[in-house]
């Protein structure tokens, strides 16, 4: 079962979170998305009859772009050539400015407040772009 089934107006999307790194390789037709993730998303697309899939991967310490978008288009030949679009986004879940001193001197919720606000804004921007 997908993490989220969303409807924005008439648009329906499936959103799924992944807790692993997506790699960058310009020669990879899967755009760094694992074969297993693609199979899983195609199964969701067929099961729920939704062609817009959003995958959310964590950013990395080296990666500063918050929402790198990679799109893979898959054609379902058994469903009259229906196109399934799998969009992968990297979202900020790491705060590289957070220090041990911050964790030792502030409430934990305060340490992650800016990260939370930033993540909410990133997700809103991704959903608004629908």
Image: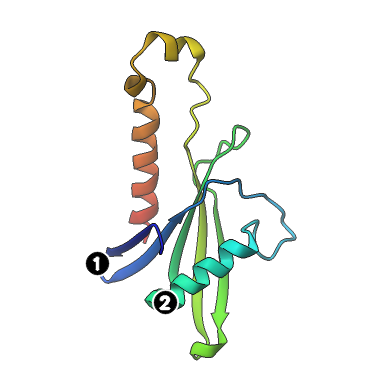
Q: Secondary structure at mark 2?
A: helix
Q: Tell me: 3 left or right of 65.
A: left
Q: Is residue 20 above or below residue 116?
A: below
Q: Tell me: 84 left or right of 50.
A: right
| Residue 79 in picture, x, y percent from top left | 49, 88
Q: Is residue 55 above or below residue 92?
A: below
The image's colour scheme reads rainbow
Q: Nearer the viewer, mark 1 or mark 2?
A: 2
- First-in-chain label (1 vs 2): 1
**Which residue is located at x 45 percent, y 60 percent?**
54
**Which residue is located at x 43 percent, y 68 percent?**
52
| Residue 123 in picture, x, y percent from top left | 38, 47
| Residue 34 in picture, x, y percent from top left | 63, 59
Q: Tell me: 115 left or right of 31.
A: left
Q: Tell me: 81 left or right of 128.
A: right
| Residue 70 in picture, x, y percent from top left | 57, 57
Q: Given the current orientation, which residue lies at the most extreme left position?
A: 9
Q: Which mark is residue 47?
A: 2
**Image quadrant assignment for residue 15:** bottom left
Which residue is label 1 attached to?
9
From mark 1 to mark 2, how far is it between C-alphas? 21 Å
**Which residue is located at x 55 percent, y 63 percent?**
71
**Which residue is located at x 56 percent, y 36 percent?**
64
Mark 2 crowd level (few <14, some 14–19, many ≥20, 10 Å Cα)? few
Mark 1 and mark 2 in contact? Answer it, CB < 8 Å: no
């Amino acid at each position: 079962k997908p993490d989220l089934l969303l409807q924005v107006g008439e648009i329906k999307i499936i959103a799924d979170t992944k807790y692993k790194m997506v790699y960058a390789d310009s020669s990879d037709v899967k755009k760094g998305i694992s074969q297993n993730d693609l199979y899983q998303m195609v199964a969701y697309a067929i099961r729920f009859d939704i062609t817009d899939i959003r995958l959310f991967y964590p950013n990395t310490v080296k990666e500063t772009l918050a929402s790198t978008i990679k799109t893979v288009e898959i054609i379902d030949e058994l469903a009259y050539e229906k196109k399934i679009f799998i969009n992968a986004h990297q979202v900020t879940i790491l705060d590289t400015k957070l220090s041990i001193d911050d964790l030792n001197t502030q409430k934990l919720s305060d340490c992650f407040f800016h990260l939370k606000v930033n993540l909410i804004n990133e997700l809103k921007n991704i959903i608004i772009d629908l």
